[in-house]
Amino acid sequence: MRRSFTVVSIVVHAGVIAAVCIAQLLAVGALPDPHAPLTFAGAIPIRVIDIPPEDKDPELRKRLTEAVFAAQFADAKHDSSSTRHPGMHITDTIDYAIVLQGELVAIMDEGETVMRAGDILIQRGTNHAWANRSDTVARIAFILVDGRR
């Protein structure tokens, strides 16, 4: 079973597109600073993320989720102690989430929604997580608009 996330970040700024494939940068040891802000004035980041199926062991799932957030999503306010899901987090963005392939579960403080290819969710700085409870990798695109509070 594939357990690693693949993240491609595309930033549109002043009409110029710069693409960075995190997996390729990891391979050459040139990963950008994970503590850099997710958005900056005039930029609209687009992230395409391949999310592998979740591990059935809750402790392993929690450790893997913590490692992914620390390495790739340090800009998110991550709360791994959440009883809802170890991936619960908040960002200062308005997220347009588009499921491209497979099936994911959008988890909020209250309730869950199963999303399939073609489904779109607009998330406005709420506490949330994504779970892949299927047997195959799911792909989702995020268009992130600065929504600093």
Image (cartoon, rainbow, N blue to C red):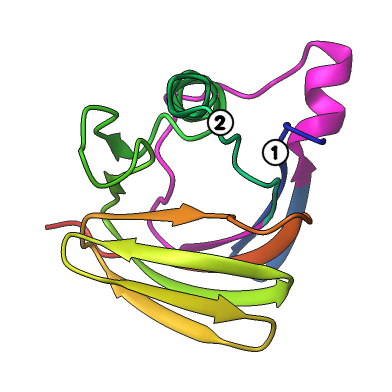
Vertical relation: 25 (above or below) 137: above
128 in magenta: no
Where, quadrant-wise, is the N terminus in this rendering?
top right
Q: Nearer the viewer, residue 130 or 29?
A: 130
Q: Secondary structure at mark 2?
A: helix
The magenta stretch is: 20-48
Q: Amino acid at mark 2?
A: Gln
Image x and y of residue 74, in percent: 41, 29
Residue 59, image x, y percentages: 43, 20
- Amino acid at dot 1: Phe
Membership of 36 in magenta stretch: yes
In the rendered image, the vertical position of residue 5 relative to residue 143, given as above or below: above
Q: Callout 1 environment at 10 Å: few (<14), some (14 to 19), or many (20+)?
A: some
Residue to which mark 2 is pinned: 72
Q: Residues within 10 Å of mark 2 (few under 14, many from 20)?
A: some
Q: Which one is nearer the viewer's eye here, 54 or 100?
A: 54
Residue 54 drawn at (x, y percent): 60, 42
Residue contact between numbered discs 1 and 2, judged by CB atoms under 8 Å = yes
Residue placed most toward the observer, 104 or 99: 104
Residue 5's disc is 1
Q: Look at 81% across and 36% down and name the residue there.
A: 2
In which image quadrant can residue 80 be found? top left
